[in-house]
Image (cartoon, grey):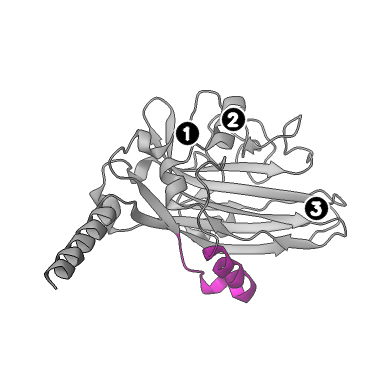
Amino acid sequence: MKHFKSFAIFIAMAIAGSAAAGYVNVGKIVVDKYELSSGTRTKGPGANMIMHWETNAAFADQMCFTEPNLRWLQLLSCSDAVGGVTPRPNRPFIDLREGQIAPGHPDGVGDGLPFYDFSYPSLGDAQGNTNIKINGSGKYMRDDPRAQVGQYPINFSFITLVVGIMPDNQLAALGGVKWGFDVDKDGKHTLLTLEALSAETIALGRFTNFNQALKQDFKDWVLPSQKTFCPDTQYYFDLAPEPSSLGGFTAFLLSVARGRRRVGLAEAA
């Protein structure tokens, strides 16, 4: 019994130590809207996305990130070239690139910063496309990607990050979501499953695809591992429970995604 009690104490201490050395959740990304959009005579099919980030009480206890320095950063990969959107030759790119055509943008095109341009201070602003913060500083982001009319098969795959601005044009990831849509060879149009980047990927990921795109699109910016800036403890945003406004189908997608949360650290997120 003595040995059993000593072993139990050892296990309890090990668990406590592991928790202390683990990753700390400091907020969440909430998906407010994620739905298919049918094509029209002038636009192909696509998706409508609105999401926002929220911090929790633990955010105030850490020293690596500050709310005024949080931004949206988005990588888009299209399986085929899309006029006015993808670079030439086609490759994964930071969305929006400088000079990229952007209907509804105050300037009509992407600016000279890597941050996602369509960000907003409130849900109402995001829904109405008003009070746009083109520097990516709004808590809300909105994207309405579309394929070209008659263009299929085609796949739009997004990785959308919340990042913190660090010294010397460096960025650190805090949370991320994978999403997008697919049009198959028969024209069938489906949403991609929502997937949160795991805490491990956010903390330790190399973000190879992001850095390759940044090198070509915004060469003065880099996205190192968060551990570069927060060596002792790393922090992450989770993906919130599904909001009721998403409806049953997307709620199902979210539930499936929860079973696939862990993303390999070697993956070029």
* Image quarter of the N terminus: bottom left
- Decide: few, some or many residues near mark 1? Use Cα within 10 Å; few <14, some 14-19, many ≥20: many
Q: What secondary structure is marked by label 1?
A: loop
Q: Tell me which residue sits at (15%, 64%) in the image.
A: 6
Q: Tell me which residue sits at (73%, 37%) in the image.
A: 86
Q: Position of residue 58 (x, y in %)?
A: 27, 55
Q: Which residues are magenta?
A: 239-259
Q: Position of residue 159 (x, y in %)?
A: 58, 47
Amino acid under disc 2: Gln
Q: Nearer the viewer, residue 14 or 111?
A: 14
Q: CA distance from mark 1 to mark 2?
A: 10 Å
Residue for badge 1: 223
Residue for badge 2: 212
Q: What secondary structure is marked by label 3?
A: loop
Q: Nearer the viewer, residue 120 or 203?
A: 203
Q: Magenta residues: mostly which secondary structure?
A: helix
Q: Nearer the viewer, residue 20 or 141?
A: 20
Amino acid under disc 3: Lys
Residue for badge 3: 43
Asked if the residue at tag 3 contacts the one at tag 2, i.e. Cβ–Cβ closer than 8 Å, the answer is no
Q: Any mark on residue 177, and which?
A: none
- Specify the quadrant of the image occupied by residue 166: top left
Query: First in sequence: mark 1 or mark 2?
Result: 2
